[in-house]
Image (cartoon, rainbow, N blue to C red):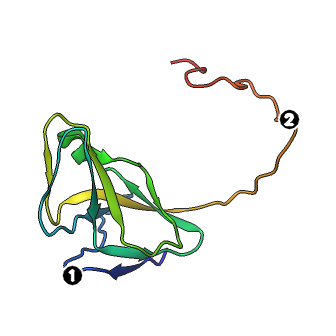
Amino acid sequence: MIAVKVLALKAGASLPAYQTAGSAGADLKALLDEPVVIEPGNRALIPTGIALELPVGYEAQVRPRSGLAAKAGLTVLNAPGTIDSDYRGEVTVILINHGSEASIVRNGDRIAQLVIAPVVQASFSPVDALDSTERGSGGFGSTGV
């Protein structure tokens, strides 16, 4: 179990909530004074009114909701967005409209999902050469379709 402290920044903020027992992501809700219209091709920063206190060694990933993407073309622009364990500001979600019609985000709408995940920090060291592999330096699409 991971203890996550949720700090209400604004009146009316909702705690992240899992919708089913098997959900990996907890839904984040918009906290808006008035609806936000996102035109096709445009983006908007949507506040949630909450801040998190994550333990060191964990991150919170902000991911799209599949229903919003499929039905309205709305997705999280920097998916997955990372909330570091030392960040204490408001959780906001960058939504982009890839659809063909304007989308309206209203107060209380479920706009993204939050996944808590462990983080491994690596040590980086310069070397003169890398071990060979079958793929080598082949780039995008080099392993076929």
Examine the rendering and report whether any part of residue 1 can be seen. no
Where is 104 relative to 83, above or below?
A: above
Please tell me whether mark 2 sits on a helix, a strand or a loop. Answer: loop
Q: Is residue 9 left or right of residue 104?
A: right
Q: Residue furthest right?
A: 128
- Residue 102 screen position, x and y as percent: 13, 43
Please tell me whether mark 1 sits on a helix, a strand or a loop. Answer: loop
- Residue 99 screen position, x and y as percent: 20, 36
- As drawn, the label of residue 11 is 1
For disc 2, the marked residue is 129
Q: Residue at x 22, y 60 (%)?
A: 110
Q: Amino acid at mark 1?
A: Ala
User: For residue 108, what is the image quadrant?
Assistant: bottom left
Crowding at mark 2 (Cα within 10 Å: few <14, some 14-19, many 20+): few
Where is 23 relative to 49, above or below?
A: above
Q: Camera-side residue: 87 or 22?
A: 87
Where is 68 relative to 1, above or below?
A: above
Q: Residue at x 53, y 73 (%)?
A: 86
Examine the rendering and report whether any part of residue 35 can be seen. yes
Q: Residue furthest top?
A: 144
Q: Amino acid at mark 2?
A: Ala
Q: Residue at x 43, y 51 (%)?
A: 80
Q: Residue at x 12, y 60 (%)?
A: 35
